């Protein structure tokens, strides 16, 4: 999966449903951590309508933020969007996927090649009024009732500890994005690096700067963000799962 680095705001000029004032539903900012720049967006689950999207009404993968916006009812707008986990060539999710209470893919608990199977991995679970990043084996034991869920990996932070396989001087440096949640589940914080960064540094961003005791890697090469309040409307090859905030009338 290739990632387009360019930010293509012009692509959205015809999609008037994607511009402010929808941005008021979620807050985004640019911040610096240890000399690196990051785009960070916070979602308040007590008031923001956070969902995960994959397919349209015909069963075809949506693939883009614009397609998600076009499927929303009149008066509803997409206020924020980010790629929502890893997927196969046909855009089927690699692991557990639940959309609006309907499970499409099952939970995977075994190690496997690539970042997804670098255990421990985890699940981003959205329930009424809260969202949580939950390590996969803990998720299997507790079986939370998620309205939306996407499994990805590796975990970045597990109970305030960094993933044990991360190296401080790791040489793999990519644009990376992930999500962490506050202990009370009321806030989900999404972060994307604006330059190549290794896993160790990216995980410490969530633990030490964003204060999320649990955080999950979403992807690297396919990292995309829709955040008009900070001038982001990334485009490129079609995505699989998409996480987004919907602003309702």
Image: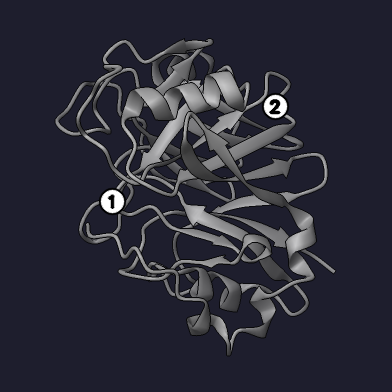
Q: Quadrant of the C terminus?
A: bottom right
User: Farthest residue in the front direction?
Assistant: 35
- The alpha-carbon separation of the residues under discs 2 and 1 comes to 28 Å
Whether tag 2 and tag 1 are in contact, CB under 8 A, the answer is no
- Residue bearing mark 1: 221
**Residue 143 visible in image:** no
Residue 16 percent location from the top left of the image: 67, 84
Q: Foreground: 111 or 204?
A: 204
Q: Secondary structure at mark 2?
A: loop
**Residue 86 visible in image:** yes
**Which residue shows up at 34% across the image and 31% down it?**
153
Horizontal arrangement in the rendering, residue 231 relative to residue 162 (left or right) = right
Q: Foreground: 101 or 193?
A: 193
Residue 40 percent location from the top left of the image: 59, 44
Residue 20 percent location from the top left of the image: 74, 72
Horizontal arrangement in the rendering, residue 26 relative to residue 242 (left or right) = right
Q: Foreground: 111 or 222?
A: 222
Mark 1 Cα-neighbour bin, 10 Å: few <14, some 14–19, many ≥20: some
**Which residue shows up at 28% across the image and 51% down it?**
221
């Amino acid at each position: 999966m290739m990632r387009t680095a360019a930010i293509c705001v012009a692509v959205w000029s015809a999609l008037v449903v994607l511009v402010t004032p929808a941005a008021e539903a979620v807050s985004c900012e640019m911040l610096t951590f240890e000399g690196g720049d990051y785009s960070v967006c916070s979602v308040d689950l007590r008031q923001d309508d956070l969902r995960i999207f994959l397919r349209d009404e015909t069963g075809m993968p949506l693939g883009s933020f614009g397609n998600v916006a076009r499927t929303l009812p009149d008066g509803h707008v997409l206020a924020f969007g980010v790629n929502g986990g890893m997927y196969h060539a046909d855009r089927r999710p690699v692991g557990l996927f639940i959309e609006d209470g309907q499970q499409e893919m099952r939970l995977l608990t075994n190690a496997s090649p690539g970042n997804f199977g670098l255990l421990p991995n985890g699940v981003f679970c959205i329930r009424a009024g809260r969202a949580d990043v939950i390590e996969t084996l803990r998720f299997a034991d507790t079986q939370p009732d998620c309205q939306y869920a996407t499994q990805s990996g590796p975990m970045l932070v597990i109970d305030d500890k960094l993933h044990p396989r991360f190296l401080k001087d790791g040489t793999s440096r990519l644009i990376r994005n992930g999500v962490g949640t506050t202990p009370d589940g009321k806030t989900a914080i999404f972060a994307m690096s604006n330059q190549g960064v290794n896993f160790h540094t990216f995980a410490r961003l969530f633990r030490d700067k964003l204060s999320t005791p649990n955080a999950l890697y979403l992807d690297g090469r396919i990292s995309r963000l829709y955040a008009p309040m900070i001038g982001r409307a990334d485009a490129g090859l079609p995505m699989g799962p998409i996480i987004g905030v919907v602003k309702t009338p």
